[in-house]
Amino acid sequence: MKQKLVIAPSVLSLDYARVSEQLADLNKTRAEWMHFDVMDGHFVPNLTFGPDILKGFKKAVDMVMDVHIMVSDPKFYAPIFIKAGADIVTFHYEAVASIKECVALCRTIHSLGAKAGVSVRPKTPIDEILPYLHEMDVFLIMSVEPGFGGQSFMEDQLDKVRKLRSYIDAHELNVRIEIDGGINAKTAKQAIEAGCDTLVAGSYVFKQDVHEAVESLLCLA
């Protein structure tokens, strides 16, 4: 089921010398989600934000907290970030031992009052996961290698988006297809045409006029 387009600006790309200003600008836009990347320095070679930072963002903006945990132990961290204010928790399929554990964690996240998302690295196939999409609210396609902002868009990942869109539509599922990495006006158009309905944008939003950037993506719908 194709849904309305949602923009999820990624705070990984905030100008941290102008946080208050940029968050105030963001609050005035039509962006509905805030994408919050959690990296543990182990699953990916970078360290980012903890739960107390999430609590601060939750107070600063009136948006859905879309938390992407790039961590080696998502079963441990998912409840922590839900308690801190996450509305959506997306974990990596590669960080669980099996599809059975993937489904179990989705159900745990739901039981704690949040929506559940699953993400895959660019080299991870999704065929094994498709029959279990009904357990998820979001499927996040990484169009760059997870770990750092500012990377170039990997167009071949749109094949996964098309496969997801076909399966979701055929089975009439209420699952969002989110994409993260290298999103700008050009790549966003490609992603939407392939079947995405949720766009994570970091550098593109925060390295220029925030309002204009968000509007330029929404007008592609």
Image (cartoon, rainbow, N blue to C red):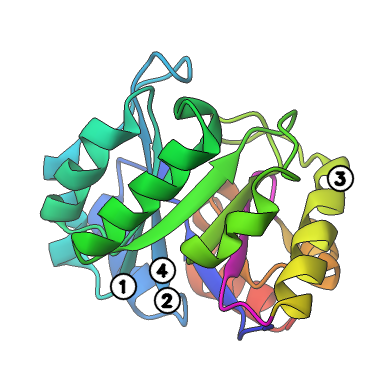
Q: Which residue is mark 2?
A: 32
Say which amino acid is labelled 1. Met
For marks 3 and 4 on the same chain, the one whose residue lies earlier in the sequence: 4
Residue 140 located left or right of residue 91: right
Up-down relation of residue 22 to residue 220 (above or below): above
Query: Horizontal and vertical percent for residue 61?
Result: 24, 69
Q: Secondary structure at mark 1?
A: loop
Residue 85 located left or right of residue 177: left
Say which amino acid is labelled 4. Trp
Q: How far is disc 1 from disc 2 in space, using C-alphas?
A: 5 Å
Q: Secondary structure at mark 4?
A: strand
User: Which residue is depicted at the point 33% across and 34% down?
Assistant: 74
Q: Which residue is mark 4?
A: 33
User: Which residue is depicted at the point 29% across and 62% down?
Assistant: 110
User: Which residue is depicted at the point 59% across and 61% down?
Assistant: 133
Q: Secondary structure at mark 2?
A: loop
Q: Which residue is mark 1?
A: 63
Q: Which residue is mark 3?
A: 155
Instruction: Give yes or no for contact between labels 2 and 4 (Cβ–Cβ under 8 Å).
Output: yes
Pointer 2: residues within 10 angstroms few (<14), some, or many (20+)? some
Q: Quadrant of the N terminus?
A: bottom right
For marks 3 and 2 on the same chain, the one whose residue lies earlier in the sequence: 2
For marks 1 and 4 on the same chain, the one whose residue lies earlier in the sequence: 4
Instruction: Give yes or no for contact between labels 1 and 4 (Cβ–Cβ under 8 Å).
Output: yes
Instruction: Give yes or no for contact between labels 1 and 3 (Cβ–Cβ under 8 Å).
Output: no
Q: How far is disc 3 from disc 2 in space, using C-alphas?
A: 25 Å
Say which amino acid is labelled 2. Glu
Query: Horizontal and vertical percent for residue 214?
Result: 56, 72
Say which amino acid is labelled 3. Glu
For marks 1 and 2 on the same chain, the one whose residue lies earlier in the sequence: 2
Instruction: Give yes or no for contact between labels 1 and 2 (Cβ–Cβ under 8 Å).
Output: yes
Task: Give 88 or 199, whichever is nearer the viewer.
Answer: 88
